Image (cartoon, coloured by chain):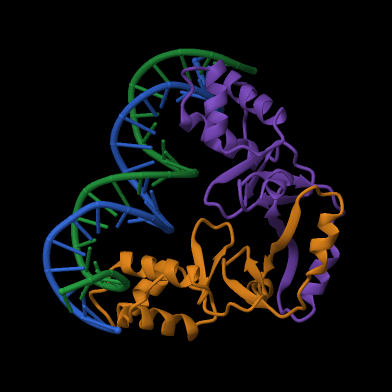
Chain colours: A orange, B purple, C green, D blue
Amino acid sequence: MNLKHSKQRDSIMEFLRERKDHPTADVVYMNVRKTFPNISLGTVYRNLTLLADIGEISRIRVGDGVDHFDADTSPHYHFICKECGSVIDLEMEDMTDINETANKNFSGLIEGHITYFYGKCGNCSTKS
Amino acid sequence: MNLKHSKQRDSIMEFLRERKDHPTADVVYMNVRKTFPNISLGTVYRNLTLLADIGEISRIRVGDGVDHFDADTSPHYHFICKECGSVIDLEMEDMTDINETANKNFSGLIEGHITYFYGKCGNCSTKS
DNA sequence: TTCCTTGCAAATCGTTTGCATAATG
DNA sequence: CATTATGCAAACGATTTGCAAGGAA
């Protein structure tokens, strides 16, 4: 894959890096538009997909029907608040051992797992 | 919620119960159509959503952009093959303890987790 | 000058919904 | 009869794609 520089892509990366709340494509679009008023949603999607493909960012699917994106590609777990829907990083050790547990009665080959936790975030659990 | 009987719904449930490969709405539609040629996709979606809401079946989101459905509502983990995309039940103990692990450095309240494993299924790992 | 990237709009995909009619209790 | 369920088609939201024009190497 042959890449060329693009100010739009840089701006998307930059925005993603300064946010730790895993924005959606639309949120990226809204914000990058402050710098590039003419950028199109298509361009945002194209770049997010490209960046995810080359491993610069990661795509997070938490089952809310919308893809979230994260500039932090280091392995870590996510928490999703049932109330406000926010996606939060969790500070906990990696559970690579559960792959082996899962492999015990399995005929194929387990290479990894995706886990996310849900409940109420700090904000929403005090309010109620 | 007030329910009335419907042959279409019965047929959907029946089909789901005899399959353990977690079919998508479209697959359900294709198959139930053998019995009810005039059934509409809308009806299939309506019933799958209804059945999932009342807990008769469960909706599985594995990040492939399509919802899968499972007549087995008992808690269990799933495996998704990277090659063929099939969704397979795993026989392993429940890992409720990881909720507490995750809660340690977290300010909110963790109520549960969703985990799925990925890799190559028995079929696809022998072929390659 | 090559060919990657963009903006725009149309298209696609999975899913939902409004409406008039049919089936159920 | 009162209501829920259906079939159909149109509507939807998120994402992708074709194309002609713009920008980087």
Q: Residue at x 65, y 26 (%)?
A: B15
Using the rendered view, name the quadrant where residue A90 is placed.
bottom right
Q: Residue at x 75, y 61 (%)?
A: B112
Q: Can I make out residue B4 in this image?
A: no
Residue B102 position in % (x across, y down): 77, 73
Q: Can I make out residue B18 in this image?
A: yes
Q: Nearer the viewer, residue A21 or C2?
A: C2
Q: Is residue A69 above or below residue B30?
A: below
Q: Residue at x 23, y 74 (%)?
A: A38
Q: Nearer the viewer, residue C4 or B40?
A: C4
Q: How many marks?
A: 0
- In the picture, the quarter occupied by the N terminus of chain B is top right
Residue A89 position in % (x across, y down): 64, 77
Using the rendered view, name the quadrant where residue A4 is placed.
bottom left
Q: Is residue B116 above or below residue B102?
A: above
- Horizontal side of A67 relative to B18 (left or right) equals left
Residue A59 position in % (x across, y down): 53, 67
- Horizontal side of A95 relative to B24 (left or right) equals right
Q: Residue at x 73, y 79 (%)?
A: B106
Q: Nearer the viewer, residue B29 or A9?
A: A9
- Horizontal side of D5 relative to B14 (left or right) equals left
Residue A92 position in % (x across, y down): 75, 78
Q: Is residue B33 above or below residue B119?
A: above
